[in-house]
Amino acid sequence: MADKLTSKRITAVRDSQRGFWNFLTHADSAKRRKQPGALDFSLGNPHEMPPKGYVETLKKWTEPRHPRWFNYVTNDPGAQAAVAAALRAWRGIPFEPADIAMTTGAFGAIAAALHALVDPGQEVIFSLPPWFNYESMIVAVGGVPVKVRVDPASFDLDLGAIAAAITPRTRMVIVNTPNNPTGKIYPPETLQGLADLLTRASAEHGRPIYILSDEPYSRLVFDAKPLHSPTAYYPNTLLAYSYGKTLLTPGERIGYLALAPSMPGREVVRESITLAQIVCGFAFPNAILQYAIGDLETLSIDLDHLQRKRDRLLEGLRAAGYDVHRPEGTFFLLPKSPIEDDRRFCELLAEDDVFVLPGSICEIPGYFRIAFTATDEMIERALPKFAATMARVTNRPGAARPG
Ligand SMILES: Cc1ncc(COP(=O)(O)O)c(C=O)c1O
């Protein structure tokens, strides 16, 4: 029926969502997760007030300074300059202000890159487990999603699998580091290997294969680990970033798409990105957020606190018998489900008002994802419930459901 009422393209998008849309909107847990007292670890939403200075900054930049304050704004030159300066200082790469497209978060950056660079029928490779929206965003531009698995032992990119997936129709490879949901930061050797591979394949096929480096968690890195970005290894890279993670304000839509300064023909790419954003509904962040970005650049959630929450959960889950690796970045843990059917295990947790994301939804069945944007209090309340549900499925003593 839906295909009679709406476009085939959006029907294909719905089909490609693989349960996430259902989880978000229709599943029984969708309503229960929002009830007071529910322990909702399913998505990276805030559970605490925004970082100090956030609201003051927005108030400061809301006050108009001249009559054109609320004009149409595509890329505000001040915002582009502030982002380029921050990237230069942080990454040591000479990003240019004109190569920064201001976007509605990483979502907007990914959409703009796909619309600007990918033709119908062209292939876009990404690694599993992925962020659950890549596939539908590729389908939305008529692109063909091509999936390869990461190395299951290390969660590192499998360069052999990527090489085998490349064809003359390959246009783009999406790399997400630090990775949602594995928390992996890809090491320099992997990124260099990928760059070499794509340089050879681009030359062979006579047109560039781009890397879209999706890095919204690049500032949420633990144990002072260095971040490595494909922008430092491969000239045809576009960097997608969102402030929604660092500031934990995903409802305030701002981010950017930055072209590596060594990208050939980037003047043409720049313009195509702006045009893509216009036809996607003037998809630029609102003016106030753009004016504020120089100040917002200096703010962050408390990274030490985030790391303590990761460590507390790791300790508690491992003590309860969960097999869970230590993520290097992001705010996600990816424990193994103690029973094969991860959806069923998540339902059992939900019976005790603990809501997590089944791994099947991000194409890693047998696991589940915990977002630790939750408060300390939520974590402490949830840990005994995680332990009881583990005991329940393994028939260990203490398997009674907690009250
Ligand atoms: C890997 C990844 N990319 C992109 C996004 C989109 O970020 P935003 O909603 O801040 O635009 C997310 C959000 O969860 C993500 O996890």
Image (cartoon, rainbow, N blue to C red):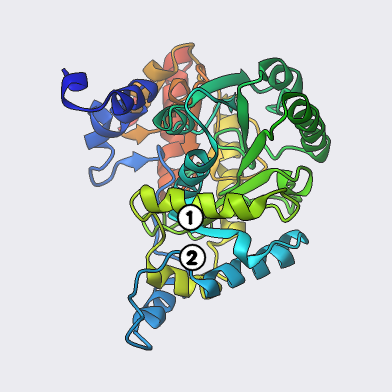
Callout 2: CB less than 8 Å from ligand 1: no
Q: Which residue is mark 2?
A: 75
- Count numbered badges in the picture: 2
The part of the image, by quadrant, that contains residue 330 is: top right
Name the quadrant of the C terminus: top left
Of the pair 328 and 196, the residue shown nearer to us: 196
The circle on residue 274 is: 1
Of the pair 177 and 39, the residue shown nearer to us: 177
The amino acid type found where label 2 is placed reads Asn
Q: Residue 310 at what x, y percent from top left?
A: 58, 45
Q: Are marks 1 and 2 in contact (CB under 8 Å)?
A: yes
| Crowding near the residue tagged with mark 2, few <14, some 14–19, many ≥20 C-alpha atoms within 10 Å | many
Q: Residue 144 at what x, y percent from top left?
A: 50, 22
Q: Residue 84 at what x, y percent from top left?
A: 64, 66
The amino acid type found where label 1 is placed reads Thr
The residue shown at (39%, 64%) is 49
> Closer to the camera: disc 1 or disc 2?
1
The residue shown at (37%, 48%) is 279
